[in-house]
Amino acid sequence: MDLSLQNRVALVAGSSRGIGKGIAAELLGEGCKVCITGRDAASLGSATAEFQSSYGADQVLDLQIDLTDESAAKRAADAVVARWGALDILVANIGSGKSVAGWEIDPSEWDRVFALNFRASVALAQAAIPKLAPSNGASIVFISSICAVEATPAPLAYSAAKAALNNYAKNLSRLVARQGIRVNTVAPGNVLFQGSRWEKRLNEQRESVTQMLDAEVPLRRFGTPQEIAALVAFLCSERAAFITGSCFVADGGQTRTIL
């Protein structure tokens, strides 16, 4: 589908691997100019080489940057505008579900998990909003998790941080709507990709993982980065021009909560 995204400028955080890389590839395929970011030089370099080979060096900017450092958000937004003179799309794909189990959680762990899964995305949005171009259908998409919308076995601090992100996005959408900026959230379920925790668990506990999918996911399989990316690209396009303040769950039917 042609989403009419040609020559739009996108900043996709956390895009050297996994879901973020899938989103960057989808937007590049739709004709966007895309800035990809990552902390690991090797994976970022590999993604950059792959994208430049497929779409051309003029379409890709790479930034090795740690967006959990909140001061880095402005540097990232500034770099995009310096390269292409505009910013139309922000995809805030920042976070990790790694934390401790149970309810006895040290305050320092709460702070760490919220800094990674909530505050980093907020800082990036705050840096990007003044630069987003409403004439080009400006859009922000936050990548959350099904842990934010329903009780799951995921760590409590992670679930709470992503729930905070969902609420932030909903309220932010009302504040920036008159600036011509749409804000939405995508909450993926179990997504399998190279190097993911699900790949590791499959290798170590294939039978139990298969049983979980059969019991909990009606479609009885993992999602792919490409499936999440297609939804994100749609939300960034003019085909979704009347959609803002929404959270879209993509989980193969796993969650039971009605949003």
Image: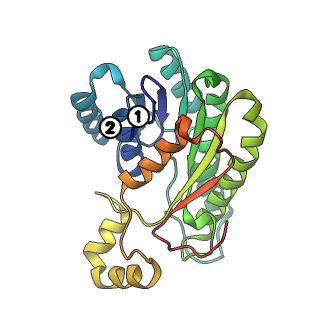
Say few, some or many: other residues with alpha carbon within 10 Å of mark 1 (under 14 / 14 to 19 / 20 or more). many
Q: Secondary structure at mark 2?
A: helix
Which residue is located at x 44 percent, y 77 percent? 217
Residue 66 is at least partly visible in this image: yes
Which residue is located at x 63 percent, y 50 percent? 118
Which residue is located at x 38 percent, y 34 percent? 30
Q: Secondary structure at mark 1?
A: strand
Camera-nearest residue between 84 and 247:
247
Residue that sits furthest to the left in the current view: 53
Q: Which residue is label 2 attached to?
A: 44
Which residue is located at x 69 percent, y 29 percent? 180
Whole-Å distance between the Cαs marked 2 and 1? 8 Å
Residue 255 lies, with reference to residue 181, above or below; the image says: below
Q: Are marks 2 and 1 in contact (CB under 8 Å)?
A: yes
Camera-nearest residue between 165 and 172:
172
The quadrant of the rendering that contains the C terminus is bottom right
Q: Which residue is label 1 attached to?
A: 36
* Colouring scheme, one of rainbow, by chain, secondary structure, one colour: rainbow
Which tag is nearer the camera, tag 2 or tag 1?
1
- Disc marking residue 115: none
User: Which image quadrant is residue 36 in?
Assistant: top left
Camera-nearest residue between 152 and 136:
136
Image location of residue 177, percent across then percent down: 74, 35
Q: Along the polypeptide, which appears first: circle 2 or circle 1?
A: 1
